[in-house]
Image (tube, grey):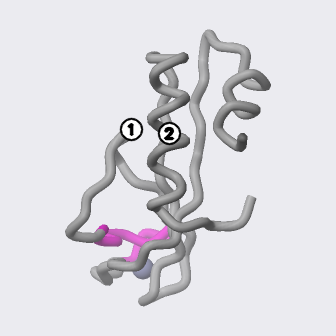
Amino acid sequence: MADVEVAELLPRIERVLTQFPTAQIYLKWTCPGCGDRVTAEEPNAFHTGGYDHVERENGTPCGSRYTGTQFGMLLVASGLNAADVLRLLHS
Ligand SMILES: [Zn+2]
């Protein structure tokens, strides 16, 4: 799934959490500094101040901040029917 505007994502996430309160949805973005695909550390949250990329996948420091509005999502739906959750998330 391509990244979409966070204004569009947040209502979807809200909808999923209403129906599946134990789902964990992590925002993902592309780091403007190093180009890595980064996953937020905290699920089910959005930080309006932006996201810092502390460490790259290869272990070297990055330090770039992303303040853009395009995000993807990583869904953790353990114990849930992931297909049901995904359908709701993408509807
Ligand atoms: Zn980075």
Q: Is residue 81 found inside the magenta-colored segment of the image?
A: no
Q: Residue at x 55, y 42 (%)?
A: 12
- Horizontal arrangement in the rendering, residue 85 relative to residue 13 (left or right): right
Could you say which quadrant of the image residue 44 lies in? Answer: top left
- Which structural element holds mark 1? loop
Q: Which residues are magenta?
A: 51-60
Q: Quadrant of the N terminus?
A: bottom right
Q: Quadrant of the C terminus?
A: top right
Compared to 3, does 45 lie above or below?
Answer: above
- Horizontal arrangement in the rendering, residue 4 relative to residue 40 (left or right): right
- Horizontal arrangement in the rendering, residue 7 relative to residue 85 (left or right): left
Give the residue type that dot 1 points to: Asn
Of pointers 1 and 2, the one earlier in the residue sequence: 2
Q: Are marks 1 and 2 in contact (CB under 8 Å)?
A: yes
Reading the image, the residue beneath label 2 is 13
Q: Which mark is residue 44?
A: 1
Quarter of the picture for ligand 1? Answer: bottom left
Compared to 39, does 54 lie above or below?
Answer: below
Is ligand 1 within 8 Å of the beta carbon of the residue shown at mark 2? no
- Picture coordinates of residue 6, whole percent (x, y): 47, 62
- Most common SS among magenta residues: loop
Give the residue type that dot 2 points to: Ile
Q: Residue at x 30, y 79 (%)?
A: 65
- Picture coordinates of residue 10, whole percent (x, y): 45, 48
